[in-house]
Image: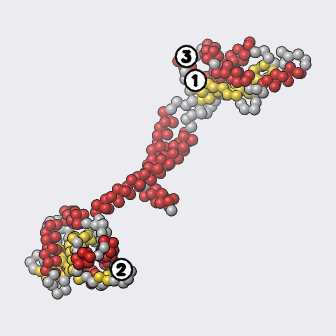
Amino acid sequence: MELRLYLQMLQRSWWIVFLTALAALAIALAAVYLTTPIYRSTASFVVSPNLDYFSEDNTDVLRSLEALDKRSIIATYAEVLNSNKILEQTMAVVQLPPSEMANYTHSTVVLPDANLLELSVDGPDPQKTSVIANSLGQQAINYISDLYTVYDVSFMDPATQPTVPIRPQPIRDASLAFVLGLAVGAVLAILREQLRTPLEAFLARTQLDSVSSAYNRRYFEDELDNFTGRSADSLVSLGLVRLEGLDNYLQVMPQPIVQQLLRQVTAIMRKELRGNDIIGRWDDNTFSIMLPNTPGEAASKTLGRLQSALSTPLRFSPDGETVKLSPKVGIGQRLKGDASNLVIERAESALDDAEHDEKGLVLFKARALVGF
């Protein structure tokens, strides 16, 4: 259930996911274009007993091999390769000034389960990385051979000039950035939906009448003002439906029953009206209906059907108890250029006359009250 909810959130805010991934891709490509390529040269060394040092007795050789298994000797050699002393000697040999040498980094690792060392040099010039790596290795070999004669350190694989930079790698970096952009975009889309939902719920609470679930009067009047303000020729009819007899029930019924009854009234209205018609609660026992682009004659027919539907007894309890209401309907039609307050006045005037009309439905016209 939660997965489907998240998928719906992503579907509604798909453009955030797309734009975030696209932005991440653009940033990655720009970084690739602006970043200086870095190359890596690697040299490997093998540590073994110096056979020239030992006698013909193989016992000493075996002991030296056992000592190598303790790893401390090889770790010492790795520290020698990483030392500043060897670096300074290398700088003197390759004749690189400290400012340029600062662009190159090196590190040495001991390969597991082997008497091997691996030296890596990273830098912007592929040729110099290989030269520095081999020079570092040679200087370390010279230094170690002067101090430790028991073991021999030698090149296993000298460094060669690299042809492909280790970074940046456009395809890899762009793909990773795009995937990360999708992930970040998905998170942003979900956060947006979660933040928007409480906001929409809050706005709905400010717009709806909590008892009937119809729009409240303030929001209804704002919508009427907005519609009539769009154009002087905007045609609209306003119907006010007063539910005679409802006051008696409102005074004695519990709030949950009142809520159930009024929401049933709202549901009947929505069933009888069009989707773009707006239903509001005008006061305690009166509902308002705005019918956009509907002349008064057509509105009177529509609201006449609604009056008949509301005249049917409404069931409000599991025991089958019903409420019999007598709806009275007043309709005000907007004439060209009229403000919304004039339409409201006409509808209220028509509703007052509907109280005394035989059919209980009155359409207000400019010069006369006509009963239906």
Q: Is residue 296 above or below residue 223?
A: below
In this figure, which residue is indicated by the disc labeled 2?
317
| 3 vs 2, front mark | 2
Upstream in sequence: badge 3 or badge 1: 3
Upstream in sequence: badge 2 or badge 1: 1
Coordinates of residue 21 in the picture (x, y in percent): 47, 47
- The kind of secondary structure element at disc 2 is loop
- The kind of secondary structure element at disc 1 is loop
Q: Residue at x 71, y 30 (%)?
A: 111
Figure quadrant of residue 331: bottom left
Amino acid type, residue under disc 2 in the picture: Ser
Amino acid type, residue under disc 3 in the picture: Pro
Mark 2: give few (<14), some (14-19) or many (20+) Cα within 10 Å. few
Coordinates of residue 104 in the picture (x, y in percent): 58, 23
Disc 2 vs disc 1: Cβ atoms closer than 8 Å? no
Q: CA distance from mark 3 to mark 1?
A: 10 Å
Coordinates of residue 130 in the picture (x, y in percent): 64, 24
Figure quadrant of residue 232: bottom left
Q: How is the image coloured?
A: secondary structure
In this figure, which residue is indicated by the disc labeled 1?
104
**Disc sitting over residue 98 in the figure:** 3
Q: Residue at x 22, y 74 (%)?
A: 286
Question: Could you tell me if residue 126 is visible in this image?
Answer: no
Residue nearest the observer in this picture, 324 or 234: 324
**Disc sitting over residue 37 in the figure:** none
Upstream in sequence: badge 3 or badge 2: 3
- The kind of secondary structure element at disc 3 is helix
Give the left or right position of residue 106, taking residue 223 as reference: right
Q: Residue at x 59, y 24 (%)?
A: 105
